[in-house]
Image: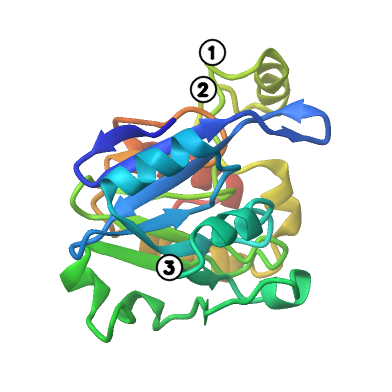
């Protein structure tokens, strides 16, 4: 079920296993100024969720922010055929069955009906370079001071499954906001990652919403910086 996080932003969560590990997954919904909804990282949809979404506005955009969060896109598109499907580059090869309306690019944040998104919708987007297996885009919702990431960082705590807590403790990431070993191993361009993180840290966010783990409501920017200082092995 959808729950409100702040003004014009909601999340919905459901169980999800990754290699047998219960990590859960989260979808974020942003209401734009024209009452259209942007759905980021869609989850499995049911009648209750459809009803809630329809109460909030019209689903105008379905966003696949990286190459891993595409499992429920076809179902979502079937329910909302008029919504535009926006996806990270490379998904067109991975999912040739999907009709993608817009490949995310550096101009994406300026392409909502020909009007700059930062002025109209109050959010920014950024491609995190250097993680080619993920090819992830992140979003900053200005009004709620929320950074929205998918697999760029995780935050497992006592609200997570016991197995997720155990793995997080073993890897040193329990109750901390930080990337996983997957991101560390997948880094191909360290300078590209560093520049992307530095750009994210210019945004004035307090909250961090991630696809896996508990939402960090306070001190998100500082925690995000600490997590990536460890990852990069150098101060940002």
Whether residue 160 appears in this view of the structure is yes
**Residue at (77%, 70%) from the top-left corner?**
94
Circles 1 and 3: CB atoms closer than 8 Å: no
The outermost residue toward the right is 19
Mark 3 crowdedness (10 Å alpha carbons): few <14, some 14-19, many ≥20 = many
Q: Earlier in the sequence, mark 2 or mark 1?
A: 1
In the rendered image, which residue does mark 1 sit on?
158
**Residue at (26%, 73%) from the top-left corner?**
117
Mark 1 crowdedness (10 Å alpha carbons): few <14, some 14-19, many ≥20 = few
* Gap in angstroms between the C-alphas marked 1 and 3: 31 Å
Q: Earlier in the sequence, mark 1 or mark 3?
A: 3
Whether residue 177 appears in this view of the structure is no
The residue nearer to you, when weighing 53 against 232, is: 53
In the rendered image, which residue does mark 3 sit on?
126
Quadrant of the image containing the C terminus = bottom left
Q: Nearer the viewer, mark 2 or mark 1?
A: 1
* Gap in angstroms between the C-alphas marked 2 and 1: 8 Å
Question: Picture quarter containing residue 158?
Answer: top right
* Gap in angstroms between the C-alphas marked 2 and 3: 26 Å
* Helix, strand or loop status at disc 3: strand
Labelled disc at residue 175: 2
């Amino acid at each position: 079920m959808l729950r409100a996080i702040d003004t014009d932003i909601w999340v919905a969560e459901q169980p999800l296993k990754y290699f047998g590990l219960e990590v859960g997954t989260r979808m974020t919904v942003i209401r734009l100024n024209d009452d259209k909804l942007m759905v980021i990282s869609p989850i499995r949809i049911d009648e209750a969720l459809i009803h809630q979404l329809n109460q909030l506005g019209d689903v105008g955009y379905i966003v696949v922010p990286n190459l891993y969060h595409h499992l429920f896109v076809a179902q979502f598109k079937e329910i909302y055929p008029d919504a535009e499907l926006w996806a990270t580059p490379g998904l067109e090869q991975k999912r040739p069955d999907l009709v993608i309306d817009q490949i995310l690019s550096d101009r994406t944040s300026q392409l909502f009906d020909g009007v700059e998104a930062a002025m109209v919708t109050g959010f920014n987007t950024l491609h995190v370079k250097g993680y080619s297996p993920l090819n992830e885009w992140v979003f900053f919702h200005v009004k709620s001071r929320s950074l929205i990431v998918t697999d760029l960082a995780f935050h497992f705590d006592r609200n997570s499954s016991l197995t997720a807590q155990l793995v997080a403790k073993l890897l040193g990431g329990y109750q901390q906001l930080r990337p996983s070993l997957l991101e560390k191993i997948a880094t191909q361009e360290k300078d590209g990652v560093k520049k992307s993180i530095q750009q994210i840290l210019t945004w004035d966010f307090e909250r961090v919403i991630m696809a896996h783990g508990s939402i960090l409501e306070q001190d998100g920017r500082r925690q995000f910086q600490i997590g990536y200082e460890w990852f990069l092995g150098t101060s940002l």
